[in-house]
Image (tube, rainbow, N blue to C red):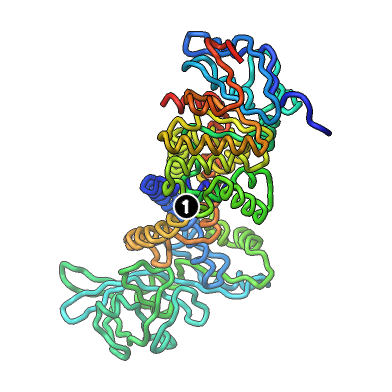
């Protein structure tokens, strides 16, 4: 009966109830987006780091992976040291750089990774043949389109290009063998991969036995942080970063994002709360006489309180459900805009949907609906019956 | 236990309240007994304290001093919880403006106090149907208040007031919003209720309604001047 009376009260002023529900829906959508934004990049980054199963990364001392053009010297020596640790299962040195490809009269530039195809964790091979020979090169979809090349085509690849004289340096012929998707690559960014020794040769002697990054996979059951600590004591030229420390680093760098998201989320929650409180308070004031009569015929204060709290919760719940859908749509749209930001890995999502976050948003909204209903419910239950009836009669 | 003595007994009851800066003495030492099965009309000019007296008998207000006993129970000084429960089980209210719940059907309106009294649904629906039949509205059970005439709405309100077998039926200007013909129907209904054993106290300006009562209590300036 309480629920039926609450529903009746909401239906009586359809337009007003609808507007309140829409208001709560917008507040929910914003709250959900802010919750998704607050945790999205962090979770997305974590998933990205763990996607290839590498637990520890070694970057040149004092830098993050690919943070600068700095490289680590003595790859073979470092590899030898790393192999002495039984907890280390796989080592993948990666050399990063850029290449220029002459296509008719055009110069097409691209980022390039020099890797060992057996242990690499930087790209997902899609079609054709992998870089099984020193003269092979694989490219991403974007570079393939720019080149207009097909598998089997021979490309003139150079380590350097002077646009003034239109001359290439360190040029070498490589055969385009396949297509790959680069996991850490940005959208609309050309990317290619060759064997590490091929890239070393392209750069001349300057890059011999060097790497931009080592990716290390630890044995199942081993503690990556202990391996990281061991590497730090054994190799002085590198900074060892486990996934946990990388996430902590990213967390620190993104803290302002989370703070902003937290503030905006709290504001939207508060706006939703005020909206429901206002609507239910107005409704209670309008029905003072009716409530007094309900009390006069023997309906308890608890009945009145429950009925009014149900009204608040109903508005919040319906608004929250609509808001969740609205929030997902806006998050997808905003994500597509932000993900196109230059230089960001395309696998990074700003807004990551997590059921827990959605449930949290829903729970917060319903909780605020209960709290929002308490003040008007308390007012309604406290109305002096005789006084309210007298006022109603005068009115 | 055999019920004896008056069902309503007020002894030297005073009710004062503030209206802005002014102190209003709505009741000034009222004493009144209403016997079981009686039908009493409280009459007098506007502002003489009729409704205040009815509110005290109905336990929706408390006296500033004096004692109020309803059905052998002291009700002055009852807590809100006690008073609410007492009203639910002992008192039926009929108001000038009917105050039915607009979204509920006639049957549901009548069943509302029974639901609060925790009667099973089948029981309360059967009793509500029986009461609507008593007031002549069997065919209007499923109608909402907006689909009923003023007289029909008032009859539903009377049926609602009788829902939990109250010891006392109180009515505040029950014909105030009705035309003469419909008012007469309600007066007849009240007479029938009384002859079937219901104790009724009405506050009214309606001379016909007052004439239909067994006793009239005349009030002026917060006092009973003739009973």
Q: Nearer the viewer, residue B2 or A154?
A: B2
Whole-percent x and y of residue B143?
47, 52
The crowd level at tag 1 (other Cα within 10 Å; few <14, some 14-19, many 20+) is some
Q: Residue A337 sits in which quadrant?
A: bottom left
Picture coordinates of residue A71, whole percent (x, y): 44, 64
- Quadrant into which the C terminus of chain A falls: top left
Task: Return the chain for callout 1.
Answer: B
The foreground one among A180 and A392 is A392
Q: Residue furthest right?
A: B1
Q: Give residue B27's position: percent from left, percent from top.
A: 58, 13
In front: A100, or B3?
A: B3
Q: Element type at marker 1?
A: loop
The image shows residue A357, relative to residue A122, as above or below, that is above
- As drawn, the residue found furthest toward the bottom would be A152
| Residue A159 horizontal side relative to residue A165, left or right | right
In this rendering, position of residue A76 left or right of residue B162: left
- Number of labels in the image equals 1
Q: Residue at x 51, y 57 (%)?
A: A358
Q: In the figure, is residue A38 to the left or right of B194?
A: left
Query: Would you identify the image quadrant in which residue A178 lies?
Result: bottom left
Q: Is residue A261 visible?
A: no
Residue drawn at 42 percent across, 51 percent down: A25
Quarter where residue A170 is shown: bottom left
Residue A63 spot, x, y in % from top left = 47, 56
Residue B103 can be seen, yes or no: yes
Tag 1 residue = B143
Which residue is at a point 68% across and 31% down the rendered structure image? Answer: B37
Instruction: In the rendered view, tell whether residue A306 sits above or below residue A101.
Output: above
Which one is in front, A334 or A31? A31
């Amino acid at each position: 009966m309480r629920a039926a009376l609450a529903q009746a009260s909401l239906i009586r002023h359809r337009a007003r109830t609808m507007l309140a529900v829409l208001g709560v829906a917008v507040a929910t959508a914003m709250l959900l987006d802010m919750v998704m934004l607050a945790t999205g990049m962090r979770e997305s980054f974590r998933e990205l780091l763990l996607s290839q199963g590498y637990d520890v990364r070694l970057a040149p001392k004092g830098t993050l992976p690919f943070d600068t053009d700095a490289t680590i010297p003595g790859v073979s020596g470092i590899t030898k040291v790393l192999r002495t640790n039984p907890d280390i299962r796989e080592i993948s040195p990666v050399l990063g750089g850029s290449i220029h490809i002459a296509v008719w009269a055009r110069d097409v530039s691209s980022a390039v990774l020099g890797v060992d195809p057996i242990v690499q964790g930087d790209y997902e091979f899609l079609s054709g043949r992998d870089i099984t020979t020193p003269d092979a090169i694989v490219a991403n979809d974007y570079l393939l389109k720019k080149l207009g090349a097909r598998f089997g085509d021979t490309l003139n690849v150079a380590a350097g290009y002077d646009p003034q004289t239109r001359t290439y340096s360190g040029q070498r012929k490589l055969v385009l063998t396949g297509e790959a998707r680069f996991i850490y690559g940005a959208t609309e960014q050309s990317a290619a991969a060759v064997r590490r020794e091929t890239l070393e040769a392209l750069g001349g002697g300057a890059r011999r036995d060097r790497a931009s990054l080592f990716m290390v996979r630890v044995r199942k059951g081993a503690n990556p942080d202990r391996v990281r600590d061991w590497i730090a004591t054994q190799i002085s030229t590198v900074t060892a970063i486990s996934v946990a420390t990388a996430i902590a680093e990213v967390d620190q760098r993104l803290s302002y994002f989370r703070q902003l998201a937290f503030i905006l989320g709290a504001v939207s929650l508060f706006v939703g709360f005020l909206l429901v409180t206002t609507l239910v308070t107005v409704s209670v004031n309008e029905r003072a006489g009716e409530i007094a009569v309900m009390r006069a015929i023997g309906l308890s204060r608890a009945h009145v309180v429950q009925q009014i709290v149900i009204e608040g919760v109903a508005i919040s719940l319906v608004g929250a459900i609509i808001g969740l859908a609205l929030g997902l749509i806006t998050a997808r749209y905003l994500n597509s805009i932000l993900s196109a930001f230059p230089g960001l890995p395309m696998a990074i999502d700003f807004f990551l949907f997590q059921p827990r976050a959605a449930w949290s948003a829903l729970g917060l909204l319903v909780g605020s609906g209960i709290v929002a209903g308490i003040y008007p419910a308390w007012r309604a239950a406290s109305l002096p019956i005789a006084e309210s009836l007298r006022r109603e009669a005068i009115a | 236990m055999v019920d004896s003595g008056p069902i309503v007994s007020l002894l030297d009851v005073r009710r004062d309240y503030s209206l802005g800066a002014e102190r209003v003495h709505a009741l000034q030492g009222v004493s009144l007994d209403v016997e079981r099965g009686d039908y009493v009309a409280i009459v007098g000019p506007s502002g003489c304290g009729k409704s205040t007296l009815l509110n005290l008998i109905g336990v929706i207000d408390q006296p500033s001093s004096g004692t109020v006993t309803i059905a052998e129970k002291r009700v002055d000084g009852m807590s809100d919880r006690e008073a609410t429960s007492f009203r639910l089980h002992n008192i039926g209210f009929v108001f000038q403006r009917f105050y039915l719940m607009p979204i509920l059907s006639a049957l549901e309106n009548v069943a509302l106090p029974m639901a609060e009294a925790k009667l099973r649904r089948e029981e309360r629906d059967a009793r509500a149907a029986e009461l609507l039949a008593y007031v002549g509205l069997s065919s209007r059970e499923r109608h909402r208040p907006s689909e009923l005439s003023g007289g029909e709405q008032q009859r539903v309100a009377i049926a609602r007031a009788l829902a939990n077998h109250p010891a006392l039926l109180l009515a505040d200007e029950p014909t105030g919003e009705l035309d003469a013909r419909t008012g007469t129907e309600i007066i007849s209904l009240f007479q029938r209720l009384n002859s079937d054993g219901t104790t009724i106290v009405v506050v009214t300006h309606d001379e016909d309604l007052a004439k239909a009562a067994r006793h009239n209590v005349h009030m002026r300036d917060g006092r009973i001047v003739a009973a």
